Amino acid sequence: MLMKEYRICMPLTVDEYRIGQLYMISKHSCEQSGGGEGVEVVRNESDIHPQYGRGQLTEKRIYLSSKLPSWAKAIVPRFFYVTEKAWNFYPYTITEYSVSFLPKFSIRIETRFENNNGDNDNVFGDTPTPAENVSFLDILTDPIPEKHYKETEDLSRWQSSKTGRGPLEKGWRDDHKPIMCSYKRVQCSFEVYGFQTRTEDFIHRNIRDILLVGHRQAVAWIDEWHGLSLEEVREYEQAMQKKTNSKVKSNQNNTGPSAASRPVFSRSISVTDEHSLKKMGVTTAAMSDPDDSTVLHSPIRLNSTPE
């Protein structure tokens, strides 16, 4: 299992980011959905956790077959989705990802938000993350994939009319007020011989890009969400979820009646794929129809929400 801790600072307060995070995730998910792929929201409801109290439980299906590298496409069904479950007990959140036909694959992300510049070396209050496993991500200077770059989200050119903040300059984390940090402890595991290291490295590279893009957007879009109440941003969230779900399902409906209702894993795996999975140690009997309730309760999480 590969574990890393990412620390991402933003020129916001923790209270501000509570609104900005919800807004950013909803808008980002909608932008990334289309062509039968993207994020479908299955559940979004209040929940009471025995340890953390009242919070919000969100469950999503992330369809992303075409976004996989070629080596991964060879071992997965033509249609599949990742199940993401997130428990929001702000300023602490837990996110988990799972894939029904890959029981040896898992991702768990714990997040804490604090009003500092990332100098808390034991933010989770248990065992400090070894220094070599801590990565500071700079939303101003760290590179992102060219396809995600937008001039309007370039924080060296960003200026907020509502707050007067921006643009950011090199070294901004040393003296900017306000400042907060998103601490993310990410554990990913794919315990399949011959694929483990490659897969875990691939996951962390993608998580890094997702975190940078998402946190840049939360700041760049501040004039769209700053001043909204929690109730108002929840209403926006609901409206965007309906729009996003419609974008994902509309294209699936065009692929035929069976795909419109569900991408059935077991029926889309060829004999060669199934044999390959068995050689990798993956029990094909563990594959289940995505309509089965067990899929909704399997652990894990991957893209849609950069938190």
Image: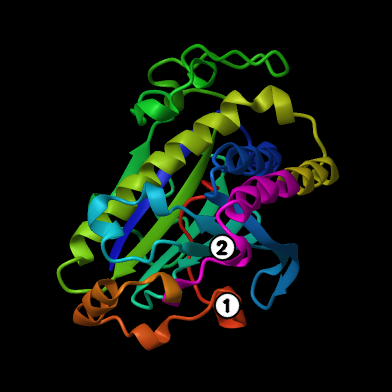
Residue behind mark 2: 259
Mark 2 burial class by Cα count in 10 Å: few <14, some 14-19, many 20+? some
The residue shown at (59%, 44%) is 29
Element at label 1: loop
Q: Amino acid at mark 1?
A: His
The residue shown at (63%, 26%) is 221
Our reading of the magenta stretch's main secondary structure is helix
Residue behind mark 1: 297
Q: Name the one closer to the observer, 145 or 126.
A: 145
Compared across the picture, whether 34 is left or right of 64 comes to: right
Q: Name the one closer to the observer, 238 or 271.
A: 271
Q: Is residue 13 above or below residue 242?
A: above
Residue found farthest to the left: 194
User: What's the magenta region?
Assistant: 241-266
**Magenta stretch containing residue 257, yes or no?**
yes
Total tally of numbered discs in the picture: 2
